[in-house]
Image (tube, rainbow, N blue to C red):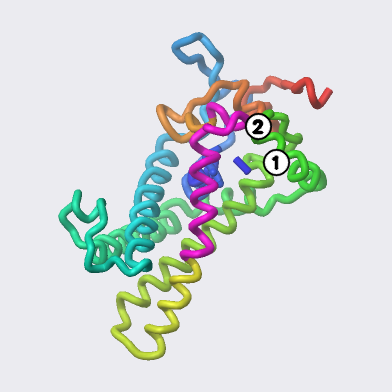
Amino acid sequence: MAATEHHDSAADPAAGPAESAGSATGRDGGPGADSGTDLSGKTTVERNPRVARWFHAAVYVAVILLLVTGWWLLLGNEGDPSVVARITGVSDTDLHTVTGWVLAGLTVLAVVVGAKSWRTFWRESVRFQHGDGAWFRRWPAAVLTGRFGRHEGRFDPGQRVANLVLVATLLVLVVSGVGLALVSGGPAFVWFAAVHRWAAYAVTPVVVGHVIIASGILPGYRGVWRAMHLGGRLRERDAHRVWPGWTERTTGRTHTPRHLH
């Protein structure tokens, strides 16, 4: 399920769901277009351009702040400032509201400025193919062994699911949050509050999963965190392991892992 990059992923989980929204501004390069080497001399490939990485960073900072302050308030701690509130000097309620408007602004910016990239993101996210079932069956063991099934997309099958869930739930959170900010009370406020709360329940485990995968702490996803950080370049062998079809199209070099021979 490699973001934010989940986003591979994400949009963040690779960042993906995983690269998720951040990958909306990504691109597929021609053969060898994005190849290079790191300081150790290992061949690298650029997974995400700078605009995607900065957008992804802005989104995940906002989402993390919203989840921390939102859950703090949901658990009944409104009168007791959280660590974030103490650090910033802003109450959790105000911080949650302001950050929510920031996320809403980022959403509008992405739709207006990155319309073409969003179309690419959606096309790749709904690209389900024959063989995806086999990929999912291999996935639980592959997160430890790195022996993922073959797929041809920019996102792996798990990322595609995470992308759709993340974007849908974040949009629901943004819309219901705006509703809560604009409505002072009554049945509409109660309805927005319920939708907002249930969307938070749904998005939290997906975000946590994306962070775990995108961090590269799982053996199968080692190195993928570089796709959204430090120049967006990761070692080619790591890219081949997680995104084989995309990497071959980008570098013009094929690579068949031993377990797929």
Residue ID at (30%, 59%): 99
Indicate whether residue 212 is drawn in magenta.
Answer: yes
> What's the distance in space between the residues labelled 2 and 1, CA to CA?
8 Å
Q: In the displayed orientation, state which residue is furthest to the bottom.
A: 186
The three-letter code of the residue at mark 1 reads Pro
Q: In the drawing, what numbered circle is on residue 165?
A: none
Indicate whether residue 174 is drawn in magenta.
Answer: no
Q: Secondary structure at mark 2?
A: helix
Residue ID at (57%, 49%): 121
Q: Nearer the viewer, residue 159 or 152?
A: 159
Q: Which residue is mark 1?
A: 140
Q: Which residue is mark 2?
A: 144
Tell me where residue 198 appears, x and y as whole percent. Answer: 50, 70
Tell me where residue 201 appears, x and y as whole percent. Answer: 50, 64
Q: Which residues are magenta?
A: 200-223
The three-letter code of the residue at mark 2 reads Leu
Q: Quadrant of the C terminus?
A: top right
